Amino acid sequence: SQTIHQWPATLVQPVGSPLSLECTVEGTSNPNLYWYRQAAGRGLQLLFYSVGIGQISSEVPQNLSASRPQDRQFILSSKKLLLSDSGFYLCAWRVAKDTQYFGPGTRLTVL
Amino acid sequence: GESVGLHLPTLSVQEGDNSIINCAYSNSASDYFIWYKQESGKGPQFIIDIRSNMDKRQGQRVTVLLNKTVKHLSLQIAATQPGDSAVYFCAEREAGNTPLVFGKGTRLSVIA
């Protein structure tokens, strides 16, 4: 069966510090991968998605970047965090026409 | 871009009653629709999905109805339980590799 992992689960970072969030998927090949951000009590904002290794589509211009160094690995990064980067970051995957599944999320607080 | 919206942002239901959560979408090219349940502090959990060639699909205690004529999607939960309390999101997408477009979410509160 397929499993999606995200780490860390929670993170507190100072403004101006770098960020690296990792997402990995097990049990599937060549998935579409997605990064979403969710502000407290709000909806899901798509940040990036990838249909293959090295292919990244950016949905919202911002302080973040994404990379896909391996088929089942998706990384969200920032060189300098802003207060507005705080939120709940969710990774998701799907294969072909199948259902999209979400990971457990990372709670990021920027102080 | 086009988006998916919800009629009701909050819904309170008595335990044991049926719940109906509604969703309106605007993209007539959407051919796949899905409902998620999100509990506090957790990632969204898949509930049920439906493709545009269907107008009804049933799962365990849940039913999704799709009305393509008026671009309306609904989630029905039978015999609502306290564990059903969560935020529910609808989402839709076009055919191919396009990403899901999410609605704003409805918070369901079950009154014991």
Image (tube, helix red, strand yellow):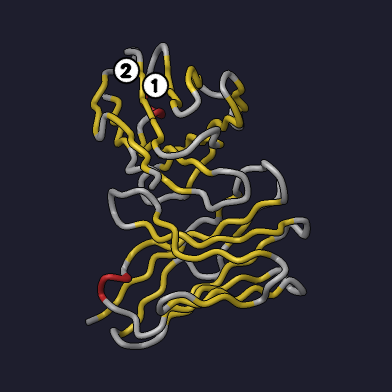
x, y percent for residue A46: 54, 38
**A26 versus B11 height, above or below:** above
Instruction: Kindly report the distance in space between the C-alpha atoms of the residues bearing marks 1 and 2.
Output: 5 Å
Does A71 appear above or below B38? above
Q: What kind of element bears circle 1?
A: loop
The answer to whether one can see residue B94 in this image is yes
Name the residue located 40 percent from the left edge and 61 percent from the top edge. B37
Instruction: Pick the quarter of the image with the C terminus of chain A.
Output: top left
Q: Residue furthest bottom?
A: B17
To which quarter of the image does residue B72 belong?
bottom right
In primary-sequence order, the first of circles 1 and 2 is 2
Q: Type of residue at label 2?
A: Val
Q: Which residue is at the front of the view, A55 or A14?
A: A55
Q: Is residue B59 left or right of residue B12?
A: right
Q: Position of residue B86 (x, y in %)?
A: 34, 64
Q: Is residue A90 above or below residue B84?
A: above
Q: Residue at x 50, y 65 (%)?
A: B48
Amino acid at circle 1: Leu
Where is residue A74, by image quadrant? top left
The residue indicated by pointer 1 is A82
Q: Which residue is mark 2?
A: A15
**Residue drawn at the location 31% of the way across and 87% of the way down:** B16
Question: Is any part of residue A63 visible from this angle?
Answer: no
**Residue B29: x %, y % from top left:** 77, 56
Q: Are marks 1 and 2 on the same chain?
A: yes
Which residue does the image show at 65% across and 59% down from the upper left? B32
Horizontal arrangement in the rendering, residue B70 relative to residue B38 (left or right) = right
Q: Position of residue B34 (x, y in %)?
A: 55, 60
Instruction: Please report contact status of discs 1 and 2: CB closer than 8 Å, yes or no.
Output: yes
Label 1 marks a residue whose chain is A
Callout 2: 10 Å neighbours few (<14), some, many (20+)? Answer: some
